[in-house]
Image: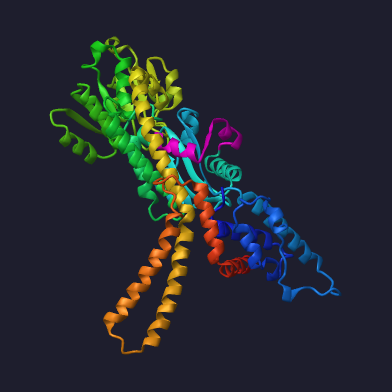
Amino acid sequence: MAVSSTLCGAKWERLLVNACSSPGASSLRACSLSQQQMKAFSKPNSGKKGLAQRIGGVRCEVAQSEAISEGERIDPSKASALSALEQLKTSAADRYTKERSSIVVIGLSIHTAPVEMREKLAIPEAEWPRAIGELCGLNHIEEAAVLSTCNRMEIYVVALSQHRGVKEVTEWMSKTSGIPVSEICEHRFLLYNKDATQHIFEVSAGLDSLVLGEGQILAQVKQVVKVGQGVVGFGRNVSGLFKHAITVGKRVRTETNIAAGAVSVSSAAVELALMKLPESSHAAARMLVIGAGKMGKLVIKHLVAKGCTKMVVVNRSEEKVSAIREEMKGVEIIYRPLTDMLACSAEADVIFTSTASETPLFLKEHVKDLPLVSSEVGGSRLFVDISVPRNVGSCVSDVGGARLYNVDDLKEVVAANKEDRLRKAMEAQAIIAEESKQFDAWRDSLETVPTIKKLRAYAERIRAAELEKCLSKMGEDIPKKSRKAVDDLSRGIVNKLLHGPMQHLRCDGSDSRTLSETLENMYALNRMFGLETDISLLEQKIRAKVEQSKK
């Protein structure tokens, strides 16, 4: 597929600047590109011959008027700079003109990586804009988005080069998390273009969650869009992808009833705890919830839904607990400050932890001296930790009389309704396939947007110029009504003439026209009306970059 005309933008300039910033490239002439050379980069690679054959190889030449005379000696340092730039442009042209930018997802999820790794890679929501900025600062990344939850850490990018883009993002993940690249590669998954689109649609629909159809992930996808608004780097392709994913998530839940009986991570945690307790003890088990944030509140709601009428909630402040108490009338919710956490734990049979603490609240030394629980509740105190990073250290599982479960253990809850999950997932997949096709068509249509804009601008310039000539010949005493009639006439003629070409530049899935046909029409119009990239402006940008790199 042909590269977008925006290839000759910021990323292309950066490549040229890198080559021209060497000491030997002191002359701006080494980075001056002729119009013919720059057009060669933006032309589609659709002819019978290869790119190098059509343009006879890409060269970096000094303008004809500045040619070196036969008797003049060439400065070796300048010649070296010219040679390096020539090689760079040749390789870049070959690398990027064969395909347009790709949507890539580099991710680690509960299905591929342990919680120990995911918690190191996790990026707090407040840090998403900074992460997007750093990712888009990489050489081969144009746009980026971060989806970081307790079950997944996924980075979505628009990459100029799939291989180099993945390499740069993986190295960035290693640098920010401290995890070796080799270890990340062992657990990561990579998806490109249509597969990446289908993946985020499945994620938003709840098909990739531990609990089918859970609604929390859709809210998290919405949050990606909310946080990304106005952030440089959260561009049209990525924002369009996530907005479409939200539409898919809503449609799947509405049309398949996939959320009926489905639960969130918090609900799964409650179900897991009840599965581990003797059924006869459900009503009498002493429940302790540590953390009254979003996840903690959901845990409380699901405990109430399962028949629990009394529980203790430990939180930094009483305000959130009071709000929950007001919302759930008839349930005894006892507040305790964080300083009473261990004392409350000694009186609890089941402890749910869901705080944002970056260090464990419970370690082996905190748990070993707690009194044993009654045999009526199984004889073991349950710790159900749904936080990432974890609130309960793995060493707690070594303590006799304590059993620890974290988000990775929720798979046991999911297995309870496998047949129904598969049926609903099949219904959802049909919707996802339909929506994926629509998104791909929308993204394909973006290829022709610059040509449509330039063709309209070209026609408008001609119309305005000819209208001015006509009105000047008619004299200054033309009535406003006649002037408007002539103006409307010129606009009507232009719009009717443009209607045909515009129709043949559309590729939105509304007709049988293929993308290749549409792109052929686009290239033909570019050639006929001279709508290629403004080379002079591009050269000015490159010169400015070169000057800046010397300072």
Q: Which residue corresponds to the image point at 24% horizontal and 16% vertical from the top-left?
A: 282
Q: Is residue 397 above or below residue 233?
A: above
Q: Is residue 377 above or below residue 232?
A: above
Residue extent of the magenta highlight: 179-203
Q: Residue 84 in the image: x percent, y percent?
A: 73, 58
Q: Residue 385 in the image: x percent, y percent?
A: 37, 27
**Residue 50 in sight:** yes
Q: Which residue corresponds to the image point at 24% horizontal and 25% vertical from the top-left?
A: 303
Would residue 335 be found to the left or right of residue 498 on screen? left
Which of the image's four quarters has the C terminus?
Answer: bottom right
Q: Is residue 348 above or below residue 519?
A: above
Would residue 245 be found to the left or right of residue 331 on screen? right
Q: Is residue 98 above or below residue 266?
A: below
Q: Which residue corresponds to the image point at 25% horizontal and 18% vertical from the top-left?
A: 285
**Residue 127 in sight:** no
Q: Quadrant of residue 425?
A: top left
419 in magenta: no
Q: Nearer the viewer, residue 401 or 453?
A: 453
Magenta stretch secondary structure, dominant: helix
201 in magenta: yes
- Say how the picture is coloured: rainbow
